[in-house]
Image: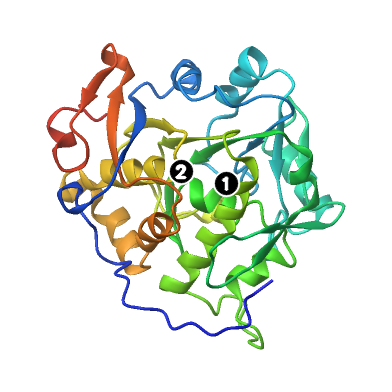
Amino acid sequence: MSCDCKHAVPGTGGETYIPMSERTGNESTVYFTRDLSAEGLRKIFERVNAGITGKVGIKLHTGEQNGPNIIPRPWVQNLIETDLPDATIVETNTFYEGDRYTTEQHRKTLEVNGWTFCPVDIMDEDGVTTFPVKGGKWFTEMHMGKNLANYDSLFVLTHFKGHAMGGFGGSAKNIGIGCADGRIGKKEIHQREGSNDMWSIATEELMERIVESAKATVDHFGEHITFVNVLRNMSVSCDCEGTAAAPVVTPNIGIVASTDILAADQASVDLVYALSEADHHDLVERMESRHGLRQLTYMKELGMGNDRYKLVDIDNGDAEILAADAVANVVPFEE
């Protein structure tokens, strides 16, 4: 539920990129591979899977029908069959009317997109539950798909890309919007009370609401949640746009992983910014024009992790890479 108090949104600079040299605080570890394949995904997951125990949910964006940019299904199938044989993909229905608005539509879309090799739990199929939001200014609790509470661990497997309103979709967006149920939670994030515009909340406030929702899930799972971002087929559009997504013009980069949600998303953003101006222009413009970088600074304010990190290159014998500003000098990006 929302707080009763009113809050003004300060000038939090969600359109302004903060380079590593201007960040303060502790460092986390982020693993990196250029190996965009099923094997690459398996290798990097092994570095961050220590807390993934018991009944495991995999929070994945399974996409609208025939979406071209989602994480390849064979990669996920291989990972599940070899490393997580009892895991379940978890999703929720959408706030907007589309291919995943109702559970019936959603299950048809899962079939069309080939997510048929393991169980898929549409977590709000049987209703909602609430998780507390600690220290938030917009929420005291968030409405989640009821079945999220049934899992012991959550593996957040994210296709990193742009987003029409969020600027970018990383791990925070994947769980912040993706675990909230389709009728209540997502409405609380996107629509101002009393407004007829379902997208009436934007820029800094939207980012903060997404992050507070993500924090509820992160806090719930504690040490039993981990984050992998796949930087491939990075349209400025989210996978929720399906075949209508804008063409991909940003080069593929690789995969990052961390047990720190902020470090994972910050490293992903840094790797995009480290591309040449020509290569990163469209995606950076999408992030900044939507004030999406507020996701990162607000996660830090809420104590969700570190925006400073060491980037460990698992392709080169665990070599530590200079992060952020200097990373482009040492990482040969794939076209």
Q: Residue 261 carries which label?
A: 2
Task: Identify the residue at the far right of this view.
Answer: 126
Q: Do we see residue 108 in this rendering?
A: no
* Occupied quadrant, residue 130: bottom right
Residue found 44% across the figure and 83% down from its top: 8
Task: Name the side, left or right, on which 98 lies relative to 251.
Answer: right
* 314 versus 210 height, above or below: above
Q: Residue 218 carries which label?
A: 1
Task: Name the side, left or right, on which 34 lies relative to 97.
Answer: left
Kind of residue indicated by mark 2: Ile
Alpha-carbon neighbours of circle 1 within 10 Å: few (<14), some, or many (≥20)? many
Residue found 71% across the figure and 33% down from its top: 152
Q: In which quarter of the image is the C terminus?
A: top left
Give the mark nearer the N terminus: 2 vs 1: 1
The image position of residue 230, as x and y in percent, is: 44, 35
Which sits in the foreground, 228 or 24? 24
Q: In which quarter of the image is the N terminus?
A: bottom right
The image position of residue 279, as x and y in percent, is: 22, 46
Which sits in the foreground, 10 or 172? 10
